[in-house]
């Protein structure tokens, strides 16, 4: 017989947690990341129990990593059967995690996570993941072992973008009790029993010892994270203001001595992240010493850091901005930079061209082919570049527009087209007035599409 008290208690605690943390607004679409394991099944049942109360539309998504052969397929089928029984719409994705791991030279755990979240991003609405207080404790221990700062000690975030964690309040034992009381089965990942993975060793060897010292260690750490999160939020706001005041384009952090130490390291992190430079606690400690004493330090990704006259400067060595790459443009695919592909198509017919012109998605990537003068060159930035943007009656400095509109991580890999009369296309900025496409007039259309690893290249500022 089901224990209605335990079932109701779990659901009530979940509802209270969602309301207190304002995780899920009423009338939201919530997609449950469903692995078939205990945590995710409990999450799905909890969301369905609150469906009417919070006016939710609940869906589910499952990712088959194909790492455990028949067991992976078993998990996918379990999720299909469960969602069919519960009348929940389910989307199943398939990923070749091993191929992704080899291609990117990362751990299998990181590869699986990257693939999983990439699939999740394709779903609509909020994405609910089944992280628990026990997962949070394991994460804290893992970060302590590897080295972390205040932000790392805040644990798993309650929300990040569209991702929310509605059962982060619950311990794993509570989840299992809830499922037992509900009479609900779940699947078990056989790799959870192995100590080949770092998190499993923490779960099997370290957490039991912590519980001997403090049986309520999950609750204690949860309270600690909540307190530290408040402090971290305050310092983040201070760092955001300081970085805005002391950062100078493209890679300078000025007046280091005026920035409080607790804020300065966060400004340094922002400087590194702007340039796509990975970091760890050891590197941050070294850069903090550099900020105090001056000198030079070799970073990764072809960068070094130099501090002199109270100013930190990042210097890139793997690309000389004075060297301009130039190749003849051709219809089809070609590459100017590693990881980027330029797709150029010629669209013929006035009626066909009009269909593309009115589509705003391509508004900055369309040129009237018949207005181009002579041969076209695909190239990188050149000193003194200028362009007369479509709709303007004057020319502008491309360098200035790049500084105003293009994020740092894209500035060294932008694409340009020029004909015999000058620049006709600047990536992220637009096309020249003299070659702009006009509906009902343009008969041959040049369509420029720039991709990064199969995805549309990003040159817009994005906020988390």
Image: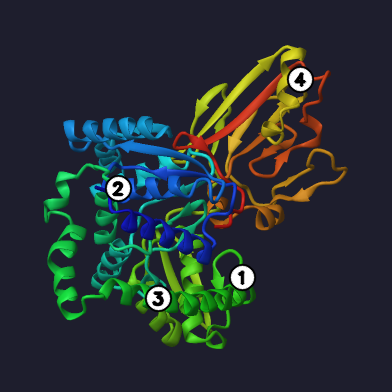
Q: Residue furthest front?
A: 1
**How far is disc 4 from disc 2 in space, using C-alphas?**
59 Å
Image: 144 above or below 451: below
Number of labels in the image equals 4
Image: 133 above or below 359: below
Q: What residue appears at the point 26 percent right and 75 percent down from the top-left corner?
A: 217
**How far is disc 4 from disc 1 in space, using C-alphas?**
43 Å
Q: Nearer the viewer, residue 71 or 18?
A: 18
Q: Are marks 4 and 1 in contact (CB under 8 Å)?
A: no
According to the image, label 1 marks what residue?
248
**Of marks 4 and 1, which one's residue comes earlier in the chain?**
1
**Of marks 4 and 2, which one's residue comes earlier in the chain?**
2
Residue 120 position in % (x across, y down): 43, 42
Disc on res. 172: none
Sort mark 2 into few (<14), some (14-19) or many (20+) by Cα contacts within 10 Å: some
Sort mark 3 into few (<14), some (14-19) or many (20+) by Cα contacts within 10 Å: some
Residue 92 position in % (x across, y down): 37, 32
Residue 286 position in % (x across, y down): 35, 78
Q: Are marks 2 and 3 in contact (CB under 8 Å)?
A: no
According to the image, label 3 marks what residue?
296
Q: Are marks 3 and 1 in contact (CB under 8 Å)?
A: no
**Of marks 2 and 3, which one's residue comes earlier in the chain?**
2
Q: Nearer the viewer, residue 78 or 433?
A: 78
Disc on res. 354: 4
Q: Kindly report which numbered mark, 2 or 1, lies closer to the viewer in this rendering.
A: 2
**How far is disc 2 from disc 3 in space, using C-alphas?**
61 Å
Q: Are marks 4 and 2 in contact (CB under 8 Å)?
A: no
């Amino acid at each position: 017989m089901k224990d209605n008290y335990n079932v109701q208690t779990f659901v009530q605690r979940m509802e209270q947690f969602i309301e207190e943390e304002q995780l899920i607004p009423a009338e939201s679409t919530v997609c449950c990341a469903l692995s078939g394991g205990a945590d995710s099944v409990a999450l799905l049942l909890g969301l369905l129990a609150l469906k009417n109360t919070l006016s939710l539309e609940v869906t589910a998504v499952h990712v088959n990593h194909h790492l455990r052969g028949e067991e992976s397929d078993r998990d996918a089928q379990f999720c299909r059967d469960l969602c069919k029984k519960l009348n929940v719409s389910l989307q199943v994705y398939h990923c070749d995690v091993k191929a992704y791991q080899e291609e990117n030279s990362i751990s299998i755990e990181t590869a699986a996570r990257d693939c999983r979240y990439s699939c999740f991003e394709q779903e609509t609405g909020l994405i609910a993941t089944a992280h628990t207080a026990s997962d949070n404790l394991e994460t804290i221990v893992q970060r302590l072992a590897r080295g972390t700062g205040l932000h790392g000690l805040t644990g798993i975030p309650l929300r990040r973008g569209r991702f929310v964690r509605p059962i982060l309040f619950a311990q794993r034992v509570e989840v299992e009790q809830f499922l037992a009381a509900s009479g609900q089965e779940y699947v078990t990942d056989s790799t959870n029993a192995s100590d080949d993975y770092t998190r499993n060793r923490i779960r099997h060897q370290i957490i039991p010892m912590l519980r001997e010292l403090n049986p309520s260690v999950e609750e204690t750490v949860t309270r600690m994270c909540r307190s530290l999160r408040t402090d971290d939020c305050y310092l983040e706001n201070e760092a955001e203001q300081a970085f805005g005041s002391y950062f100078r384009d493209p890679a300078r952090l000025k007046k280091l001595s005026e920035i409080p130490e607790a804020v300065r390291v966060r400004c340094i992190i922002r400087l590194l992240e702007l340039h796509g430079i990975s970091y760890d606690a050891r590197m941050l400690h070294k850069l903090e010493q550099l900020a105090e004493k001056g000198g030079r330090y070799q970073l990764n990704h072809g960068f070094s850091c130099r501090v002199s006259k109270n100013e930190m400067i990042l210097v890139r060595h793997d690309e000389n901005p004075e060297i301009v790459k130039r190749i003849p443009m051709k219809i089809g695919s070609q590459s100017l930079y590693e990881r980027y592909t330029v797709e150029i198509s010629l669209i013929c017919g006035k009626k066909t061209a009009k269909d593309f012109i009115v589509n705003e998605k391509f508004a900055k990537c369309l040129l009237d082919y018949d207005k181009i003068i002579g041969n076209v060159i695909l190239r990188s930035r050149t000193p003194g570049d200028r362009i007369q943007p479509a709709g303007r009656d004057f020319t502008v400095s491309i360098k200035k527009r790049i500084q105003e509109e293009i994020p740092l991580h894209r500035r060294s890999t932008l694409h340009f087209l020029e004909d015999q009369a000058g620049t006709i296309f600047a990536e992220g900025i637009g096309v020249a007035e003299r070659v702009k496409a006009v509906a009902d007039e343009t008969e041959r259309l040049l369509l420029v599409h720039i991709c990064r690893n199969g995805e549309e290249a990003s040159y817009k500022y994005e906020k988390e």
